[in-house]
Image (spheres, helix red, strand yellow):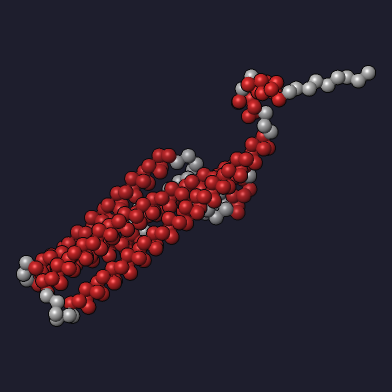
């Protein structure tokens, strides 16, 4: 005698699924499959974060280089125009004030981007650190092969609290442009050259000071926020020198 096998139709299978909670269906998935899916997701996430980190860093350098090239071209063009005797000196001054003012506005946007670049770079570094921490907790031995940290502490922001070289370069460029524009405005009012030079020095120093205050304030705020949301502290090796 052969035992009859029960055949379940597709409609009956769907009815059975309706009565099975989704959570229990997820729990029925083997843990190995869940782990492999998590690893695949984190590796994909890590790749995307790293590409964003590289894009932000590269774009900052490109913007600064473009601004330096543009500034050199504008100032060089003004120097050539100043040698033309046919051009009225007053018109030249107005044109120079306008062009340098445009450079200052454009430079301000580049400067703000460079500050955001450092903040976003630290954010991406901390995000990659969290993913590395996942693998370190799964296999602590891989710590010996990692050069980058496996935590989410804001090391870059801590380093940039003294301001990065790109930001410092941009601050001095902006200070020079603001001083030049101020000097050309004062020259229209027939102020003595010695007074213009003295005022120019003061304007240059004040501009640098205010720009540094702005950059440091934003970075310090981002640093304090990063410390509050940090979840994984640095893993100290007992073999490290103290």
147 left or right of 33 in image: left
Which percent across, then down, holds residue 242? 49, 52
1 left or right of 199 in image: right
Which percent across, then down, holds residue 211? 26, 56
> Which image quarter holds the N terminus?
top right
Residue farthest to the right, as pictured: 1
- Quarter assignment of residue 173: bottom left
- Quarter assignment of residue 22: top right
Residue under the image location 21 percent in, 62 percent down: 101
Say whether residue 127 is visible. Answer: yes
Residue under the image location 19 percent in, 59 percent down: 206
Compared with residue 242, is residue 137 higher up or lower down, i.e. above or below? above
Work out whether residue 178 or residue 242 is closer to the camera in this orientation and state it.
Answer: 178
Residue under the image location 62 percent in, 49 percent down: 142
- Quarter assignment of residue 72: bottom left
Say whether residue 197 is visible. Answer: no
Residue under the image location 71 percent in, 25 percent down: 10
Compared with residue 89, is residue 230 higher up or lower down, i.e. above or below? above
241 left or right of 121 in image: right
Which percent across, then down, holds residue 202? 16, 63
Work out whether residue 209 or residue 42 is closer to the camera in this orientation and state it.
Answer: 42
Work out whether residue 172 or residue 113 is closer to the camera in this orientation and state it.
Answer: 113
Compared with residue 207, is residue 89 higher up or lower down, i.e. above or below? below
């Amino acid at each position: 005698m052969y035992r009859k096998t029960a055949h379940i139709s597709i409609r009956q299978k769907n009815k059975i699924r309706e009565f099975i909670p989704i959570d229990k269906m997820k729990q029925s998935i083997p843990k190995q499959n869940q782990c492999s899916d998590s690893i695949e997701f984190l590796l994909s996430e890590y790749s995307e974060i790293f590409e964003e980190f590289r894009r932000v860093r590269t774009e900052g350098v490109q913007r600064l280089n473009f601004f330096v090239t543009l500034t050199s071209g504008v100032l060089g063009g003004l120097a050539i125009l100043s040698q033309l005797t046919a051009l009225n000196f007053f018109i030249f001054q107005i044109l120079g004030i306008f062009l340098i003012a445009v450079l200052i506005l454009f430079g301000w946007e580049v400067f703000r981007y460079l500050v955001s670049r450092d903040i976003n770079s630290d954010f991406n570094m901390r995000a990659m650190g969290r993913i590395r921490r996942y693998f370190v907790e799964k296999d602590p031995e891989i710590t010996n092969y990692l050069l980058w940290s496996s935590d989410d502490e804001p090391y870059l922001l801590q380093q940039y609290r003294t301001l990065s070289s790109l930001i410092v370069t941009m601050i001095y460029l902006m200070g020079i442009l603001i001083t030049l524009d101020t000097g050309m405005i004062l020259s229209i009012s027939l102020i003595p050259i010695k007074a213009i030079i003295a005022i120019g020095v003061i304007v240059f120093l004040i501009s640098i000071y205010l720009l540094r205050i702005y950059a440091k304030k934003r970075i310090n705020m981002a640093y304090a926020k990063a410390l509050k949301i940090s979840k994984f502290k640095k893993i100290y090796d007992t073999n490290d020198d103290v």
